[in-house]
Image: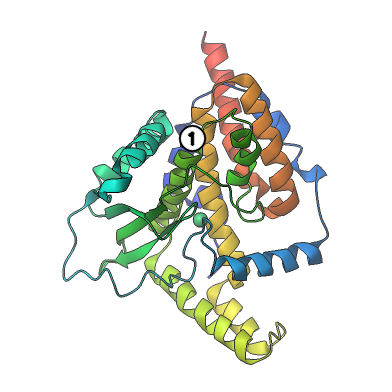
Amino acid sequence: MKRQTDIARYPLDAALTLIVMSRCPSLFAVLASLLLFAIPAHLKAQQRTELRHSALSSPELRSSPSGTDARNDHIYSSQPKPGIEEIIPEQYKRRYQEWKSEFLACETGRRQWETYAHHPGLLLTITVSGEKRNGAITGKFKWGDSGNLIAATITLGYRIDEGSPDPIYYPVLSSLGPLVDSGAISGRILAAAKIAHEFGHVNQTALTPGALYQLQDRLIRVHEEILLRNGHNTLDPRLMELAQEMGATPEQIWEDREYWAERNAMLYLDDRITEERLRRSLSANINRTVGLYAKGYDKRFIQVARSRHTAAEKFVSAK
Ligand SMILES: [Zn+2]
């Protein structure tokens, strides 16, 4: 099946786009110049492969593209009770509440939270782990008999208010780094943006057919096993067959998933950061990073800015 990258195929995502409120029309103008930036494709591919493999054993923020930590430990004998369940160790409760408050401080966060808090058929578990530091992971996915996602778990590191991930797969979160380091943006907003990233994984997984998602996870593992055994020969015809069956290469699946999550972080930040100077700095950072590393996905990010731009025009014209 063809890999899904078209925003119009995701009704929830389109709906999420619409909730963005208007404050800075200039965002679109800045992001629309994305195509000005590029690095050689072979270098990008090499960096991506290295990062992806290092990320698998790294504590940095990442999703669970292969679901390696997501299987077999969250088995339900029947449909779990839907809603949001927060399992927060006592020592992390205070900081978690601060991050959550920050996530809920704007409409984007509130609406997404409410969506899952009152979801009729999905249990979203949120927890904080002492084993993860700056990173977070979304996994433990479970699908019902009808193929709908019925459970997911977001595991947050205990220090997600510090540290920003690599720009290659995280063009939005990494763009916050300099602003957090300079004190212009608080660590709580960084933490909330990471929560938004993880919510983005849940959103995207819920919208992907369960059978396709599970097929991709299974074949990605087969793909990696073949690579390990054939001396990393990427021209192995078996890999090409697998990519055909999955509808994309593992790298493409990985980046597709991460960029949907990053887009959700961008939606949150677009709503949360209201100061014009900060918005411009962040837009410039995201613009540059998306142009460098996520060029093929720039429309996904421009769409956020464009929806805001359109909403801004409507708002102004309605005055
Ligand atoms: Zn992720």
Residue 19, above or below 154: above
Q: From this viewpoint, which residue is outermost toward the top? A: 319
Q: Position of residue 309 (x, y in %)?
A: 60, 26
Q: Where is residue 46 in the image (x, y as percent from the top left)?
A: 74, 68
How many numbered discs? 1
In the rendered structure, the answer to whether residue 117 lies left or right of residue 235 reads left
Colour scheme used in the picture? rainbow
SS of the residue under disc 1: helix
The residue sitting at 71% across, 29% down in the picture is: 29
Q: Mark 1 points at which residue?
A: 189
The picture places residue 6, in percent across and down from the top left corner, at: 57, 53
Q: Quadrant of residue 111?
A: top left
What amino acid does circle 1 point to?
Ile
Q: Position of residue 298 (x, y in %)?
A: 67, 47
**Nearer to the camera, 299 or 261:** 261
Left or right of 253 in this view: 99: left
Rendered image quadrant of residue 141: bottom left
**What's the residue at 32%, 46% (across, down)?**
92
Residue closest to the far front = 91
Label 1 crowding class (10 Å Cα cut-off): few <14, some 14-19, many 20+?
many
